[in-house]
Image (cartoon, rainbow, N blue to C red):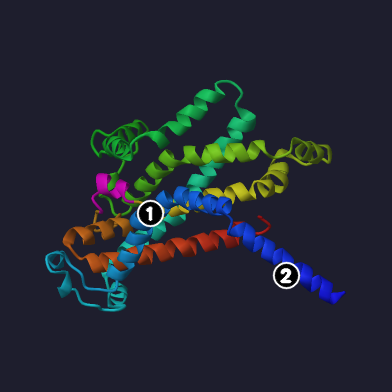
Amino acid sequence: MAGLTVARTRAARTAGARTARSPHRRRQMYAAWGFAAPFGVLFAVFLAGPVIGSLMMSLTDMRSADLRNPFAVNFVGLANFGKLAGDQIFGQAALNTAYFVGVGVPLTMVVALAAAVALDRGIDRFRMAFRVGYYLPVVTSIVAISVIWRFLLQPDNGLVNTVLSWVGVAGPDWLASTTWAMPSLIVMACWRNFGNLMVIFLAGLQAVPRGLLEAAAVDGATAIERFRYVTVPMLRPTLLFGAVITGIGYLQFFEEPLVMTGGGPLNRTLSVSYDIYNQFGFGNYGYAAAMSYVLFLAIVLLTLFQFKLLGRGVR
C-alpha cells in the first residue's frame, strides 16, 4: 500500500513538472514577468535605489565638494549618528517635533472625531456643505494657507489680535514669541488637516451597527455611555488608522515653519525635517542622510507605540 502511494506521488510530481515546462505554461510565465517588469524597474530605480543610496551616504562624510570627485568620500561608519547626539540644534529640532506631534496629533483627532459625530448624528441640514467646507483646507496649497495665517496672526493689524482687542485682550506677537509660535503652528496644522480625518471617522461611524446603539439605549445607557462603551470600541480600527497617518505626517512637518517662521524665534519652531533641509542646503550630505534615518526610526517607533496603544483587539 505504501509503495502504491509513493508511486502515485512521483507520478503527480512528474505530471506537474511536465505541465510547468509546457510551452503554454512558459508563455504565461513570460507574460507575467513582462507585466511586472515596469513596476520592478521603477521600484528599483526610484525607490529602492535612493533608499539604499541614502543609507550608504549616511555612513560617509560626503559633502557638496565631493560631487566633483566621488573617490574623495571617506567611510566614517556611525560617526554621523554619534555627532547628532551632541548637536544642540538637532536636539532642539527633535524637541520641537515631539512637541508638535504630542500636542497636534491628539488635538487633530479629537476635533476631527467631534466634527464627524456632529455630521453623523447632530447636523441634518446643509450636511454636504459642512463636509465640503471642512475638507476644503486639505486640498488647498499648504503654502497659500501658511501665508494667509501669517497675515491673520500679525501683531498690529492681524484679524486674531483685532478680535481679541474687542474684548480688551492685547494679543501677543504670535509668530515672534518663543511661547506662542509653536502653538500657533499646531492650531493652523489642526485646522488644515482635521477635515481629512473627519471623512475617515465619518465612514467608520456609519459602519457602527445601529442595532447595538438601540439595544444599549433600551438598556438605559445615556448618549455619553453609548458613545464611550459602544461607538469608541467599534471605531478602534479607524482611530488606529487615523493616528498612524496623522503621526507620520506630523513627524515630517516642514512647510509650516518654512513659510511662517523660518524656524524661529530662536529655533523654537525648527523641525527635524527643516533641519535636514538646511543641512542638505549647506552641502553636508552624509550628515543630513544620517538625520533622515533618525527621523525614519522615530516614525517606526511612533507607529509601533500607536499599534500598542490602539491596536489591541484589532485584526
- The residue under label 1 is 41
Q: Residue at x 78, y 67 (%)?
A: 8
Q: Residue at x 20, y 69 (%)?
A: 62
Q: How many labels sit on residues? A: 2
Relative to 69, 156 lies left or right: right
Q: Per the image, is 57 magenta? A: no
Q: Quadrant of the N terminus?
A: bottom right
Query: Residue flagged by tag 2: what amino acid is it?
Result: Arg
Does residue 246 sit above or below 65 in this rendering?
Answer: above
Tell me the SS state at disc 1. Answer: helix
Relative to 242, 64 lies left or right: left
Q: Residue at x 62, y 41 (%)?
A: 204
**Residue 150 at x, y percent in the picture:** 27, 39
Does residue 14 sit above or below 143 in this rendering?
Answer: below
Does residue 79 sit above or below 274 in this rendering?
Answer: below
Q: Does residue 31 appear in the picture of this structure?
A: yes
Q: Which region shows up in magenta?
A: 254-263
Which residue is at the front of the view, 174 or 71?
Answer: 71
Relative to 287, 37 lies left or right: right
For mark 2, does the 10 Å Cα neighbourhood hold few (<14), some (14 to 19), or many (20 or more) residues? few
Q: Does residue 105 appear in the picture of this structure?
A: no
Relative to 55, 118 lies left or right: right
Q: Which label lies toward us, 1 or 2?
A: 2
Q: Residue at x 37, y 58 (%)?
A: 44
**Residue 270 at x, y percent in the picture:** 29, 56
**Residue 137 at x, y percent in the picture:** 40, 34
Q: Quadrant of the C terminus?
A: bottom right
Q: Which dot marks residue 10?
A: 2
Name the image quarter holding residue 226.
top right
For mark 1, does the 10 Å Cα neighbourhood hold few (<14), some (14 to 19), or many (20 or more) residues? few
